[in-house]
Image (tube, rainbow, N blue to C red):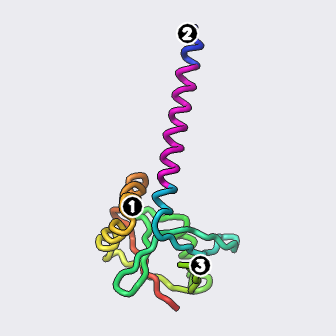
Amino acid sequence: MGDDLLRTIVKSGALGTISVFAVIFLLYRFAAERVEVIELHTYSEVNEIVTTRLWILDFEGFQYFRVGSDGSGWYDRLQNTLVKQGYFEMTRDGKSARYRSENRPEKSIEINQLMSAKYGWGDAFIGMLTGGRFGSIPIQLIPL
C-alpha cells in the first residue's frame, strides 16, 4: 500500500509539473505572438536561411528590435550575416526589405519603456522568464 501511494504521489507531482510547464509555454507563445511580430532572415553557420520572429518598434523614424544583455542565437546569426553580405533581410507586414543595423545601448531605457507600452503584459511576462530587460541592447535598423 505504501508503494502504491508513493507512486500515485510521484505521478501526480510529475503531471502537475508537466502541466505547469505546459501552461508557461502556452502563455509564452501567446505573449510573444499576440502583438506585431516581424520575421528576421539570417544565415546559419552552414549557410542555411534561418527565420526568427521578433518584436519590433518604430521610434524617431527608425525601426528597432532588442537583444538581451547575454546575447542570443538570432543575434549571433545577424552579426554573421552582416559580416558575410553586409546586410540582412526582414519581412514586416508581408513586405521584405534589406537593412544594416547599429547597436544603440544609449537608448536602452527609452526603447524598453516603449516596448513595454506596445507589448504590455507580454513584455513583462517574457522579461520575468528571461531575467528582465536590464542591459538589453536596442538594435536600430537602417534601410538600404
First along the sequence among labels 3 and 2: 2
Image quarter hosting the N terminus:
top right
Q: Residue 79's spot in the image, x, y percent?
A: 54, 76
For the residue labelled by badge 1, is the local secondary structure a helix, a strand or a loop? Answer: helix
The range drawn in magenta is: 8-28
Which amino acid type is shown beneath numbered disc 2? Answer: Gly
Answer few, some or many: residues within 10 Å of disc 1's Cα (few below 14, many 20 plus, some between 14 and 19): many
Mark toward the start of the polypeptide (1 vs 2): 2
The image quadrant of residue 15 is top right
Q: Residues within 10 Å of mark 2 (few under 14, many from 20)?
A: few
From the top left corner, tell me how far across and down residue 129 is, in percent: 42, 52
The nearer-to-camera label among 3 and 2 is 2
Please say whether residue 44 is one of the residues in the magenta stretch: no
Taking depth in this image into account, of 102 and 8 the one nearest to the observer is: 8
Q: Which residue is farthest top?
A: 1
SS assignment for the magenta stretch, majority? helix
Name the residue beneath numbered marker 3. Answer: 81
Please state which of residues 78 and 18 is positioned toward the viewer in this rendering: 18
Q: Residue at the location (69% across, 74% down)?
A: 47
Q: CA distance from mark 3 to mark 2?
A: 60 Å
The kind of residue on which mark 3 rests is: Thr
Residue that numbered label 2 is attached to:
2
Q: Which residue is mark 1?
A: 123
